[in-house]
Amino acid sequence: MNVLTLLRTPPPVHAFAPGDDELVYGRLNGRRNALVRVERAPLPSDWFRLGPIGLLQVDRQELSGSLSALTRRLDKVPKQAGLVIPNAWIRSVVLEPGELPQPRDEAEEVVRWRLKKLLPCRPEDVRLDFIPSGEEGRILVVLALERPLATVEEVFTAAGVHIGRIEPAAVALTALLPASATPVVLAVVEERALALVVLAGGKPVLLRHKPLPADARRAELFITRELTRTLAHAREQVKLIGPVVVWLVSADGEAVAEVERWADGETNVVVNRLAVGAGRVPVEVGSRDVSLWSLLGTAWGGEAR
């Protein structure tokens, strides 16, 4: 699945991000530290469906039509590209499988066996990746149903685009964070959802995704409650010790203020707002920063921020 592990070769300068109602394309410059072109094509609001473990079904025809409309505006169709998927498309779980075999395929079989009682489907039906998560043999497993992901890849392949890298938007954004020896929590507040990524030693050790209440005030309180729970869980299970830096991505000023008030009441918690430097992404009227920043992050090759 390649959702967490950085590739040894440089990622493609082209990337696509399917969202709730549009497909976004971005091309980075040669240094991979700025988007030099962005294109968008609409998608109907019901073009995909979610299930218990993320993406359940996609409308192949709608995605294909949107991709075709978008690529017609390009000078030529990119042969290779990264894909930044919505955070809601994946699920994650922390397991303690004990010592795993060294061969990756054998280790994956052990992980799938441990997932049997946790999934509402056969473990063979999911695509997964896993990395160490703290001590005591814990691993972070990120997974999604194989069939709908394969359908998305097939649509791009039919258009002449090979998808070589798939990342959830929140994971892509972690590439834009400054290097830090201090544990970090990235909190991404979208219109209807909250994504949290806990990083230790620069690597994700915990991922969470939660739908937000429709009421604005309830949503603000929900965000701080989930931050409290996530930090408590990370300190206990991942053994995070000492100060923690929270990097916040949000266009909602009230939500930002609520998180800052929350941090004032916590011990050893500092809140910063994530922002990319001027000129890193094209200025667009009504643009959604998260989608552009995630396209930038998935192929990032410059200094953070």
Image (cartoon, grey):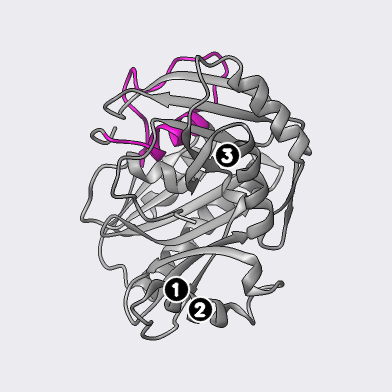
Q: Among all residues in the image, which is located at the extreme bottom?
A: 98
Labelled disc at residue 105: 1
**Magenta-highlighted residues:** 272-301
| Magenta stretch: includes residue 273 | yes
Left or right side of 168 for 216: right
Left or right side of 15 for 69: right
Relative depth, front residue between 277 and 42:
42
Question: Tag 3: Cα neighbours inside 10 Å, few (<14), some, or many (≥20)?
Answer: some
**Secondary structure mainly formed by the magenta segment:** loop
Three-letter code, disc 1 = Asp
Q: Is residue 262 above or below residue 142?
A: above
Q: Residue at x 33, y 78 (%)?
A: 102
Pointer 3 residue: 190
Dividing the picture into quadrants, the one containing residue 204 is bottom left
Q: Nearer the viewer, mark 3 or mark 1?
A: 1
Element at label 1: helix
Pointer 2 residue: 109
Question: Tag 2: Cα neighbours inside 10 Å, few (<14), some, or many (≥20)?
Answer: some
- Label 1 to label 2, Cα distance in Å? 6 Å
